[in-house]
Image: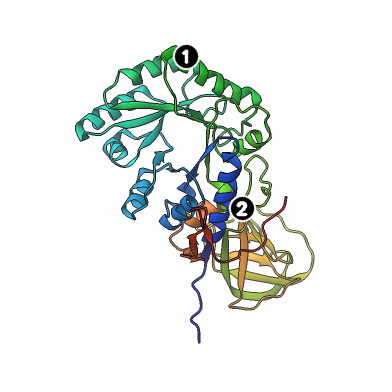
Amino acid sequence: MTAPQITPRLEIDLARVWHNSAQLSGRLALRKVAVTGVTKVALGDPRIARAMLQGGVSSLGDSRIENIIKMRQAGIQAEFMLLRSPQLSRIDDVVQYADISLNSEPEVIRRLSVAAQRLGRRHRVLLMLELGDLREGIPLSEIEQVVSLCRSLPNIDLEGIGTNLTCLSGVKPDATNMHRLSDTAVRLRQRFGLPLLQVSGGNSSSLDWLLNSDNIGAVNNLRLGEAILLGRETLYGQPLPALYQDAISLVAEVIEARVKPSVPEGELTQNAFGERPSFVQRGEFQRSILAMGLQDIQLAGIVPQQPDLAVIGASSDHLVLDSGRHPLQVGDEVRFNLNYAATLAAMTSPFVEKTYLNEGSAEHSPSGVRSPSATPRQPADS
């Protein structure tokens, strides 16, 4: 008898990760834009990193130096970009393990220079511009001053400029803010005689603008994580054409399945998380409890793949489903699609097993690009 698989678990289909990476890298290459594959939601998982690289991404990016160290120690051969401004307490690690770091603070760049001299290395910096989302970024009025600083510091090479939009405030990448980025790159090249090798136009939220714009200006790089791993654009959460939305699935196990009332009995107060849920009287129906809770997932970010199931709620370690239209039994497995926040939570939870499908299935194709030997399910057409 085959031993049951551990639940809850994430099933990560590396063939689908490869496919999504190859599709996006190929489309953007037609516009002369390179892709940095972002591994932070996967905690720098070396298997996912390899699938991205085999799919054609030009470099790997992560917000945590610990993840970059893990990938390097796993033997991943790639150019690594640290996406979050370096912490002063980790400067030596940044210089030693990251080829490029995104920066917005002059003092951090000075400290990178000191560390690079001490370690006998050169370090490349990409300056982040503030274009409205109010997360990290240098005001346009200060950018020439920071460029001058970078040029004066030993062992520091100015790689280029970039921006980040949508993540904090939801500001949409559009012709106005993207052209400000391009115009700044052109101005700096003329003012300082610099090549500015990379003009990084943001994350997965910039895909819609880039793929549909007649003029992308100087932008030649995007940093893509969610688009690759979940097959969706991040402005409205819509599926991207010809990409898989189920490269990562969550599987949980039923531990109770009973017919119960739809409305609780007794005086109601707040629940364990300070909420006051509301209930609608609809008689009795089957409620199924899964061995997974808010310590593992973000409730609003999971959707059962079986349409006859609906999420009712969750506590820290129990997830409750309405399974009245699709009766379940103890031991049954239920599969979920995830959004970015739920993927991040499940990846981070030590109680969610990570399993891999189609691992090692990629072989060299005549073009030199690795392709999966297994045929994945048909991706979305729109």
Q: Position of residue 71 (x, y in %)?
A: 37, 51
Q: Which mark is residue 132?
A: none
Q: Secondary structure at mark 1?
A: helix
Frontmost residue, 128 versus 357: 357
For image coordinates 37% across by 46% down, the residue present is 68
Horizontal placement of 96 versus 17: left or right?
A: left
Q: Tell me which residue sits at (53%, 27%) in the image.
A: 134
The answer to whether residue 151 shows anywhere in this view is: yes
- Within the image, what quadrant is residue 178 found in? top right
x and y, in percent, of residue 31 in the image: 60, 35
* Amino acid at circle 2: Gly
Which residue appears at 60% of the width and 22% of the height?
A: 179
Is residue 80 depicted above or below 297 in this figure?
above
Residue 124's place in the image compared with 47, above or below, is above
Q: Check disc 1 and give the amino acid type.
A: Gln
Please identify the quarter of the rendering in which residue 155 is found.
Answer: top left
Q: Residue furthest right?
A: 282
Where does label 2 land, which residue? Answer: 301
* Sequence-first tag of 2 and 1: 1
Residue that badge 1 annotates: 190
Does the image show residue 273? no
Task: Specify few, some or many for label 1: CA neighbours under 10 Å numbering under 14, 14-19, or 20 or more.
Answer: few
Taking the view exactly as shown, the residue that stands out farthest to the bottom is: 1
Colour scheme of the picture = rainbow
Counting from the top left corner in percent of width and height, residue 247 is at: 58, 58
Residue 161, placed above or below residue 333: above
